[in-house]
Amino acid sequence: MELLIDKISSEIGTILIVSNGKKLCALDFADYEPRMLKLLQKRYGQFSFQNVKNPQGFSDQVAAYFKGDRTSCKNLPVDTGGTPFQQQVWLALQTIPWGTTISYGELAAKINKPTAYRAVGLANSLNPIAIVLPCHRVIGVNNQLTGYAGGLERKRWLLNHEKVVNYP
């Protein structure tokens, strides 16, 4: 399997954008590349990368997010892999509006599994497509800034970029 990869610079570091030729299948930070590779290997087995500038226009759309475009990443076609439960959680992330946050419990309720907030948190931590599937908008109880696979400073930056006001 050959996957297309591009790297773009952002205010929070180099971003890796991976496409299967049709859909976005990974978006992560360069300093978390080993995590991304592990997730992709689990999903695809053997694969190789072909360096491609702006595959399917995804890089431009992610760059537009960093310029403040609220809708540039909203409807990107994604191929997440994962279990049916993980897919349900990840796709529900797309329903969290720009500039807002919800708790893990609220996200669990949103997918009609109100007691599964811990499982939702675990699925969130394995989100293969950061920013586009905005797991950074999920926070802990009492508006606590908790867990983010890209690091809490990046999560804080993303929430500030989106002008979120309901977290410490």
Image (tube, grey):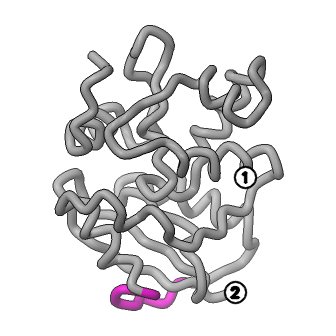
**Residue 113 in magenta stretch:** no
Amino acid type of the residue that numbered disc 2 sits on in the rendered structure: Met
Question: Disc 1 vs disc 2: Cβ atoms closer than 8 Å?
Answer: no
Q: Which residue is mark 1?
A: 87
Q: Is residue 141 above or below residue 38?
A: above
Amino acid type of the residue that numbered disc 1 sits on in the rendered structure: Gln
* Secondary structure type for disc 2: loop
Where's the N terminus, which quadrant?
bottom right
Over which residues does the magenta segment extend?
A: 49-56
Residue at 46% x, 87% y: name it.
Answer: 56
Where's the C terminus, which quadrant?
top left
Q: Is residue 154 above or below residue 164?
A: below
**Residue 54 in magenta stretch:** yes
Residue at mark 1 to residue at mark 2: CA–CA distance: 22 Å
Question: Which badge, 1 or 2, comes first in the chain's sequence?
Answer: 2
Q: Quadrant of residue 101?
A: top left
Residue 14 placement (x, y as % from top left)? 27, 63
Residue at 54% x, 47% y: name it.
Answer: 95
Q: Quadrant of residue 112?
A: top right
* Residue furthest out toward the top: 142
- Whether residue 134 sits left or right of residue 72 in the image: it is right
Residue 147 placement (x, y as % from top left)? 46, 28
Q: Nearer the viewer, residue 85 or 1?
A: 85
* Residue furthest out toward the right: 84
Residue 108 placement (x, y as % from top left)? 69, 28
* Secondary structure type for disc 1: helix
Residue at 33% x, 64% y: name it.
Answer: 15
Q: Is residue 109 above or below residue 55?
A: above
Residue 68 placement (x, y as % from top left)? 20, 58
Residue at 51% x, 85% y: name it.
Answer: 4
Q: Which residue is mark 2?
A: 1
Q: Residues within 10 Å of mark 1 (few under 14, many from 20)?
A: some
